[in-house]
Image: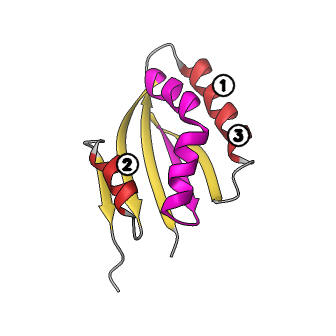
């Protein structure tokens, strides 16, 4: 089973153009990641939603390492308000998620 991620951001006032540029940079880099199966961003009323799918926990961690510098920009330009991770997460991924107070992990029911 893969890992599904849903993240919501509220972009800081006056940062919309810079935020959009950072997202475009992310999209360009993610295309190089074999374990990233889906990486889509959507603009909603008052917030932005990212939907991501990864082959496994190792792919999530590789993504974090590969785009960490751009993600740092995203976190400066917007507040992460929701982070939901669905699937069987490895201990290494669990450690990363435990450092993020808003992260919620949803393991499979079966």
Q: Which numbered dot is residue 21?
A: 1
Of pointers 3 and 1, the one earlier in the residue sequence:
1
Give residue 83's mark: 2
Q: Which residue position is annotated with label 3? A: 29
For the point 37% across and 48% down, the residue is: 83
* Residue 103 placement (x, y as % from top left): 31, 49
User: Between residues 82 and 25, which one lies in front from this camera angle?
Assistant: 25
Front residue (pair 38, 11): 38
Provide the secondary structure element on which disc 3 rests.
helix
What is the residue that sits farthest to the front in this orientation? 92
Which label's residue is closer to the chain start, 2 or 1?
1
60 is higher (above) or lower (below) than 8: below
* Figure quadrant of residue 13: top left
Specify the quadrant that holds the C terminus.
bottom left
Kindly state the secondary structure of the residue where label 2 is placed: strand
In whole angstroms, how far apart are the C-alphas of marks 3 and 2?
21 Å
**Which residue lies at the image location 57% right of the left edge and 47% below the top edge?**
63
Badge 1 crowding class, 10 Å Cα cut-off, few under 14, some 14 to 19, many 20 or more, is few
What main secondary structure does the magenta stretch of the protein show? helix
Distance of mark 3 from mark 1, alpha carbons?
13 Å
Looking at the picture, does residue 101 appear above or below residue 108?
Answer: above
Give the label, 3 or 1, closer to the camera: 3
Q: Position of residue 16 (x, y in %)?
A: 56, 21
Magenta span of residues: 48-77
Instruction: Decide: few, some or many residues near mark 2? Use Cα within 10 Å; few <14, some 14-19, many ≥20.
Output: many
Residue at the location (48% across, 61% down)? 57
Colour mapping: secondary structure
Tell us which disc is closer to us: 3 or 2.
3
Is residue 18 within the magenta segment?
Answer: no
Q: CA distance from mark 2 to mark 1?
A: 21 Å
**x and y percent of residue 36 in the render?**
63, 57
């Amino acid at each position: 089973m893969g890992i599904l991620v849903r993240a919501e951001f509220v972009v800081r006032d006056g940062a919309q153009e810079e935020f959009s540029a950072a997202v475009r940079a992310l999209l360009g880099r993610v295309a190089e990641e074999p374990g990233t199966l889906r990486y889509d961003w959507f603009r909603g009323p008052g917030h932005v939603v990212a939907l991501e799918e990864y082959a496994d926990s190792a792919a999530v961690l590789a993504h974090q390492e590969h785009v960490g510098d751009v993600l740092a920009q995203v976190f400066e330009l917007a507040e992460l308000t929701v982070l939901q991770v669905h699937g069987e997460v490895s201990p290494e991924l669990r450690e990363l998620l435990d450092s993020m107070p808003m992260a919620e992990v949803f393991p499979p029911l079966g």
